[in-house]
Image (spheres, helix red, strand yellow):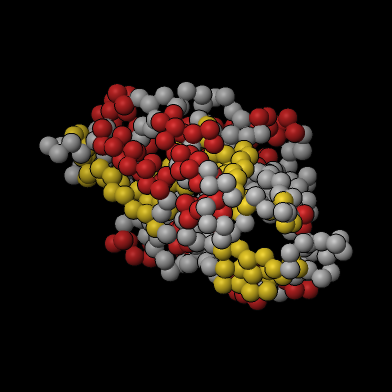
Amino acid sequence: MPYSAFVGAEAPVIQAAQFADCLGENMQTCTEANFYPRGTGPYVVSDMRPNDVVTFVANEHYREPDKPAFATVVIKGGGDAAAAARAVLETGEADWAWNLQVAPEVLAQMEAAGIGQLTTSFGTSMERVMFQWTNVDPSLGDDRGELMGGNNPHPFLTDRRVRQAMAIDQEVLVEVGYGATGRVTCNLVPAPAMYASTANDGCEVQDIEGANALLDEAGWVRGPDGVRTKDGMRLSVLFQTSTNAVRQDFQALIQEWWREIGVEVELKNSDAGVFFGNDPSSPDTYGKFWADVQMYTSSASGTDIPAYIAAYLCSQAAQRANNWLGSNNTRYCNPEFDALHAQLSVTADLNERAEIIKRLNDIVVQDYVVVPLVYRGDVSARANSLLGTAKNSWDSELWNIADWHRGD
């Protein structure tokens, strides 16, 4: 994407000499360079503790001599959204908190304390359910979750009728989990407007009767306990996500809806630091996706929609060979999608690009690789005393941190 180079978080300027030996396969092993990059921003890393805390100090060589305003910035990861919101809005322990996936009524109560305020913007953030396309049975050993050229399919989720039958009531989820900070969407790419397809409108209408008919057609028969079986196999799924009050509410609702159509659902949640971590030895990461269904939010990094939707390319499949770091953790593989994405990479006209992006979106949505749940506003909180912030969903939360300063 030529329009985004060197103008946002997706294309940072880093020192060539420092990263000269960190290309290709060496990228993962360059611990010193990756933990302590030297760039042109207002702050530089002074200490990094993975999955915990990063400490920054002002860059003495920054191009604007009167900035930044703070000598030190500490960013803490992990924990949960409610605790992060509370640290800004109620206790004053922090100045900024992002990704506040907290029930709207809870956020309103916190904001009422009067020491901080919420700020929201909409970009491409979309909470979704994703289906596993490979067999992740532990008995497979090293072949667990491997694409294997399409020769290791999931036992039943590769049947489109099963995926399509997983009925969701989007309007209920928006109301319960987000209120005014969420919207119904039927697209993987909900924005910008020129990229938003209208071919999937109507997905927000839940059809339990139609879902049951699809599963009947697919040969899944209800047993005495209400769970469907086929060829001796139970229609049973493990549904994982991160630990978060809103997500656990969503899991409970979806579990009940799926029970209505004869699907047995086991729920699992892991600490966000583990779930979104990259530890190749952990069985609980979203990249490894050793479950049947998982739920989380993803969004484009800046304005680069092609990179966002590339998460469904065959070549991006997460597998043992890439330490489960490939962006395609569903292991979906469709040559038609790959060919269209390749066409997008050589198309410059914006209107033509928009049409291709819509078609790519429609393939993923209409093949039920993902089921959109909520088009999320990006909700953050700032202390009343922190000035100069300008939330922008098309860039990093910290895109203008050089301008942040303390007020009275």
Asked if residue 319 lies left or right of residue 236, the reply is right
Image coordinates of residue 189 in percent, x first then y, are 58, 36
Compared with 26, 387 (above or below) is above
Q: Pick whichever, 178 or 192, lies toward us.
A: 178
Residue situated in front as seen by the camera: 234 or 345: 234
* Image position of 188 (left or right of 154): right
Does residue 4 appear in this view?
yes
Task: List x then y, in percent, for residue 35.
Answer: 64, 71
Q: Position of residue 302 (x, y in %)?
A: 68, 46
User: Which corner quadrant holds the C terminus?
Assistant: bottom right
Outermost residue to the left: 224
Quick check: can you spot residue 126? Answer: no
Spot occupied by residue 244 in the image (x, y as percentages of width and height): 42, 51
Residue at figure coordinates x 78%, y 62% from the top left: 68
Q: Is residue 386 above or below residue 204?
A: below
Where residue 45 sits, quadrant-wise, is: bottom right
The residue lying at 38 percent from left, 65 percent from top is 142
Which of these two is toward me, 388 or 310?
Answer: 388
Above or below: residue 346 compared with residue 386: above
Q: Quadrant of residue 265?
A: top left
Which residue is pictured at 22% across the width and 45% down the height? 233
| Callout count | 0
What residue is rendered at 63% in x and 34% in y?
A: 191
In the displayed structure, does residue 365 sit left or right of residue 245?
A: right
